Image: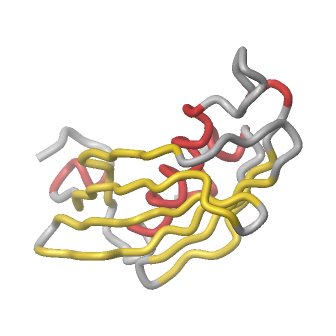
Amino acid sequence: MFERDVASRGLGIELVRAGDGAATVRMTVTSAMVNGHDMTHGGYVFLLADTAFACACNSHGPVTVAAGADIAFLRPTRAGDVLEARAAQRAAHGRSGIYDVTVTCDGQPVAEFRGRSRELTGPAATGGAPS
């Protein structure tokens, strides 16, 4: 899945590892990713966490998408900082799952993200209409 993720790869996100409901991704903040306060724009932090979430929930095999997500920003980062997002499955029931992602910079938490996943079935699992 990550190989086809043009958006994440285009921002320089690298997949460190994925498997067994967990994933780690990394990204260096560029000058194009900072806001008017000279801090990393929250949208990029969310995107990094969402990418880790996607890699973790798709590591089981079935096509899985986000059903929703929330993020809490804990501290700012700046251009040149290297952010790492580690995702782990917390719960699964049927086609639904819950994943937690911690985004860090230099080992310090930057954001906490919780994603809710849903496995697709039928034509949606192969690119058709959702079920």
> What percent of the width, then of the height, locates residue 29?
79, 41
Q: Quadrant of residue 32?
A: top right
Colour scheme employed for the rendering of this structure: secondary structure
| Left or right of 69, for residue 42 | right
Give residue 42's position: percent from left, percent from top.
57, 33
Q: Residue 76 versus residue 54: which sits nearer the camera?
A: 76
Q: Position of residue 26 (x, y in %)?
A: 71, 59
Query: Residue at coordinates 74% horizontally, 26% vertically from top-left?
Result: 34
Q: Position of residue 54 (x, y in %)?
A: 45, 57
**Residue at x-position 45% and y-position 59%:** 53
Relative placement, left or right, of 131 versus 47 is left
> Looking at this rendering, what residue extends furthest in the bottom direction?
20
Q: Which residue is rendered at x = 27% and y = 58% of the image?
A: 117
Image quadrant in which you'd find residue 84: bottom right
Q: Is residue 46 above or below residue 25?
A: above
- Above or below, 61 relative to 4: below
Q: With 114 as the anchor, is 82 left or right in this view?
A: right
Residue occupying image coordinates x 53% and y 63%: 102
Is 1 situated above or below 19?
Answer: above
Q: Residue furthest top?
A: 36
Q: How many marks?
A: 0
